Amino acid sequence: MKVKADTGKFYEIDVDALVVSVFEGETAEEGILKEIDDRVGGTIASVIGSDEMRGKSGELVYIHNTGRMKARRLLLVGAGKREEFSFDTIRQVAGAAARFLRSKGVKSMAILRRSQLDLCRSAQSAVEGALIGLYEPDAYKTQDKEERHIEQLVLATVEGDSEELIRGVERGRILGQATNFARELINEPSNILTPTEMAERAKRMAERFGLEIDILDEAQMKELGMGALLGVSAGSDEPAKLIVLTYTPEDPGVSRSKETIALVGKGITFDSGGISLKPAEGMEKMKYDMAGGAAVIGAMQAIAQLKPEINVIGIVPAVENMPSGRAQNPGDVVRAMNGKTIEVINTDAEGRLILADAVSYARKLGATKIVDLATLTGACLIALGTVNIAVLGNDQQLVDDLIEAGKLCGEKMWQLPLDKEYREQIKSDIADIKNTGGRNAGTITGAYFIREFAEDTPWAHLDIAGTAWINESKPYISKGPAGVGVRTLVELVQTLARR
């Protein structure tokens, strides 16, 4: 889909449909709504305030007679209360409008800016919302597949700096496409997206966008002493891969930041639970246990295009967790890259094992800050449901930066504690540490385990177990992979680059 900005007269935009937000309690007696209403012969005044359009979130009114406008249709979208209007509202309005208009066979659409929020970020949010809203997880359907496509999206404003509008549109395109790329990876079945294939797709992306890439095989990981990661891979016929993507500013000599931030994503391409086998019900969704890794790859795609002045490393340990005669057993002891020994109590607590070695490798590569994200614990879903990402860390500034980045991106986070008392739950009688602390505080002890390998490097952990998959379609987004974390990671990197 082509996206562009337009700062001309809204009624001269030649598209199939013009999208206009309507706030609760708003009338067509003044401002832009009155101007539009005059051009469509009073149609807006006749529907606003009726049961058809009260301005409540999710309401849609499709108008065919556009009178003195080049747009052939007009779509009114309820935006809720004006005082609650946010960048996330913009995303939802744009997503709902795009999905509705596609169902009507519309090929081109324009969204008219109506808020007083920052112009650049408003445009960015609208483009993100439309692109993310139009994604469908139907790649393997041969029947009943969505064949309609919106080919052009125009962001229009009646006032403002055209350069800011254009910049926001371009940023929105980059971030929306990166999020959808991550969603495509997450949606792939595990017989297609093996660790090898995940590495190959990361390689193709890196070559296209100018990133350095290094893919470590099992022999190289063994030489580095990555016993925790290789222990998880031992039961699978599919070899593990460690994907390392590197972004360096074009002129590092003038980079504002001397930091190197590492983004580390869990890449379990299928999680059977290993010898600690999961129940059969719902196991098909364990193809999305690599959502953290996909988010890192997607974020690196966007970072390569946005070019922040900071060094960034993306690390994805890509592994299958399978039961076999070669699989590690509960009670086994493995040695991680940093030398710590780990008693494996439960082979289904495998994500933290591969992250242990990936985080250690990030430190070896010179990371000064580390953020990992993973579909780590079912306990996170119990604690926070599908609304908030759990965030924990050993550096409060980094945690605060992540929470703020999430707010701007519409990805809510809730900080959980990491008091030293929780360390007691993962003490082992026979090794330095064990990989699970039991049912109590499962999200916290899982994070505490990873903290042991971040050591004194500023580090934060995002548990996306409850937010990585959407179980039911919404007006503005399809069910399936959410691509959560991509935009927040990019926002964080840009924040750190500006310091």
Image: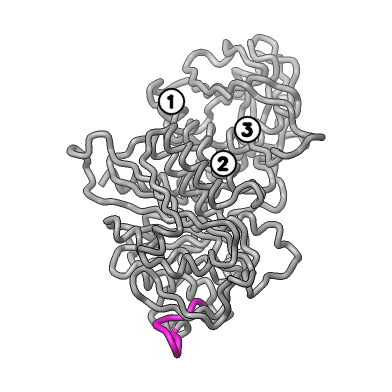
Who is closer to the viewer here, 40 or 71? 71
Coloring applied to the structure: one colour
Task: Return the x and y of residue 498 as percentages of the image width and height.
Answer: 28, 43
Distance in Å between CA atoms under marks 1 and 3: 21 Å
**Residue in view at x 39 percent, y 82 percent:** 432
Using residue 193 as the reference point, say whether residue 218 is left or right of it: left
Q: Is residue 25 visible?
A: no
Q: Of the residues shown, which amino acid type is indicated by label 2? A: Thr
Q: Is residue 350 visible?
A: yes
CA neighbours of label 1 inside 10 A, class few (<14), some (14 to 19), many (20+): many
For marks 1 and 3, the one nearer the N-term is 3
Q: Of the residues shown, which amino acid type is indicated by label 1? A: Leu
Q: Secondary structure at mark 2?
A: helix
Task: Return the x and y of residue 9 as percentages of the image width and height.
Answer: 52, 13
Q: Which residue is mark 2?
A: 89
Toward which corner of the image does residue 59 lie, by quadrant? top right
Distance in Å between CA atoms under marks 3 and 2: 12 Å
Residue that protrudes farthest toward the bottom in the picture: 429
CA neighbours of label 3 inside 10 A, class few (<14), some (14 to 19), many (20+): many
What label sits on residue 165 in the rendered view? 1
For marks 3 and 2, the one nearer the N-term is 3
Task: Return the x and y of residue 251 as percentages of the image width and height.
Answer: 22, 35
Q: Secondary structure at mark 3?
A: strand
CA neighbours of label 2 inside 10 A, class few (<14), some (14 to 19), many (20+): some
Q: Of the residues shown, which amino acid type is indicated by label 3? A: Val
Does 85 appear above or below 331?
Answer: above
**Residue in view at x 55 percent, y 23 percent:** 31
Does 470 appear above or below 446?
Answer: above
Q: Which residues are magenta?
A: 427-435
Of tags 1 and 3, the one toward the viewer is 1
Q: Which residue is mark 3?
A: 22
